[in-house]
Amino acid sequence: MHFAVVFVALAGCDPGTLDPIVTADRAGLTCLDIALPQCVPTCDPVVQGCSAGETCSFFGSGFGCWDTVEAPRELFEACEFANACEPGLACVGPEVAIVCAPDSSGCCTPYCDLDGPNVCPGAGHQCIPFFSPGVAPPGLKHLGICGIR
């Protein structure tokens, strides 16, 4: 899968553990593993739940609410960054979503719930695990993306 990151300065994290620096005002934050570790609100990409103008994106160590680009891409459109797609969509490599242009660096495809019915758009797409077996963070074993195996 292809994920890229746009850097924005936010509250700090402990670079040794990539945990938010623990204070009462930082409950519910996740530390994103980018150029300098950053804390952002934790989210579930299937539910979203971020503020307007933000999307729930994966940045290496967790899912967090992050500003979307100025003109977020829609379903099956080309993308370059994790936050380049409309909320509810992941920017993945074009090999995952066969309806995407094979020469693009990424493509917007929906997050899905592995425990739910297959609601994936796109010919031959099904809900496939987002994480490799045994590496899903607690509470995210249900997370999938619509694509091909």
Image: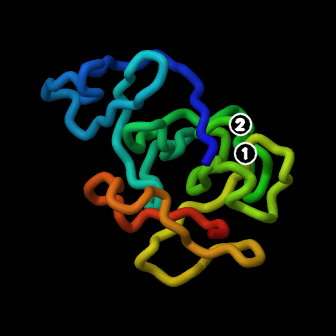
Residue 28 vertical position relative to residue 135 in the rendered view, above or below: above
Mark 2, secondary structure of its residue: loop
The picture places residue 140, in percent across and down from the top left corner, at 35, 59
Q: Quadrant of the C terminus?
A: bottom right
Toward the bottom, the furthest residue is 117
Mark 1, secondary structure of its residue: loop
* x 66%, y 58%: residue: 109
Mark 1 to mark 2 CA distance (whole Å) = 6 Å
Q: Nearer the viewer, residue 21 or 1?
A: 1
Q: Quadrant of residue 82?
A: top right
**Left-right relation of 4 to 75:** left
Mark 1 / mark 2, whichever is N-terminal: 2
Residue 51 vertical position relative to residue 133 in the rendered view, above or below: above
Give the amino acid at mark 2.
Answer: Glu
Give the amino acid at mark 1.
Answer: Gly
The picture places residue 121, in percent across and down from the top left corner, at 70, 73
Q: Nearer the viewer, residue 61 or 63?
A: 61
The picture places residue 135, in percent across and down from the top left corner, at 34, 54
Query: Mark 1 near mark 2, Cβ–Cβ under 8 Å?
Result: yes
The picture places residue 137, in percent across and down from the top left corner, at 31, 52
**Left-right relation of 13 to 1:** left
How packed is label 1: few (under 14 Cα within 10 Å), some, or many (20 or more)?
many
Q: Which residue is mark 1?
A: 106
* x 38%, y 23%: residue: 38
* x 70%, y 32%: residue: 70
Q: Nearer the viewer, residue 146 or 24?
A: 146
Q: Which residue is mark 2?
A: 80
Residue 104 vertical position relative to residue 111 in the rendered view, above or below: above
